[in-house]
């Protein structure tokens, strides 16, 4: 298999159904990891926003909340990309099964 400069597997380098299944399984684990991290970021952001309304270091807590919001956005983007990539893998697998 070949990988792009940014570490993404190039679909045309996958030559078997087993490799397709392995890729989908890997992405399933990645999806779970991003979901956990997304929930953690959203939760932490909520806590920090509440803390920012207090007297102790409001700017600090607001900044942390903003960083967590940014992380949550990236996790959502990764989750969307995983969903799209799984569909692409399934389409590629279908071409391998025809051959």
Image: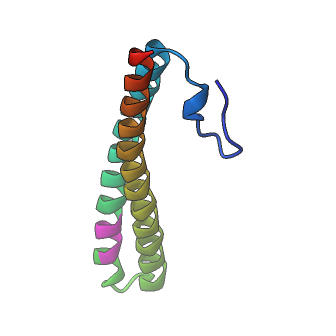
Please say whether residue 93 is one of the residues in the magenta stretch.
no
* Figure quadrant of the C terminus: top left
Between 56 and 58, the one lying in front of the other is: 58
Q: Position of residue 19 (x, y in %)?
A: 49, 18
Residue at point 45% right, 59% down?
74
Q: Which residues are magenta?
A: 45-49
Of all residues shown, which one is farthest toward the right? 5
* Figure quadrant of the N terminus: top right
Q: Position of residue 49 (x, y in %)?
A: 32, 76
Q: Is residue 83 above or below residue 48?
A: above
Residue at point 40% right, 81% down?
56
For the question of whether residue 67 can be seen, the reply is: yes
Q: Is residue 93 above or below residue 82?
A: above
Residue at point 42% right, 79% down?
62
Between 73 and 46, the one lying in front of the other is: 73
Between 23 and 32, the one lying in front of the other is: 23
In the picture, residue 4 is in which quadrant?
top right
Residue at point 39% right, 16% down?
97
In the picture, residue 85 is in which quadrant?
top left
Q: Is residue 2 above or below residue 77?
A: above
For the question of whether residue 29 can be seen, the reply is: no
């Amino acid at each position: 298999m070949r990988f792009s400069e940014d570490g993404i597997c190039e679909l045309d380098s996958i030559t078997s159904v087993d490799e397709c299944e392995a890729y989908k399984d890997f992405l399933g684990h990645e999806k779970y990891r991003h979901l956990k991290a997304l929930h953690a970021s959203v939760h932490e952001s909520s806590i920090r926003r509440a803390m920012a309304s207090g007297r102790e270091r409001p700017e600090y807590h607001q900044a942390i909340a903003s960083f967590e919001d940014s992380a949550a956005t990236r996790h959502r983007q990764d989750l969307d990309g995983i969903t799209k990539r799984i569909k692409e893998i399934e389409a590629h697998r279908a071409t391998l099964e025809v051959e």
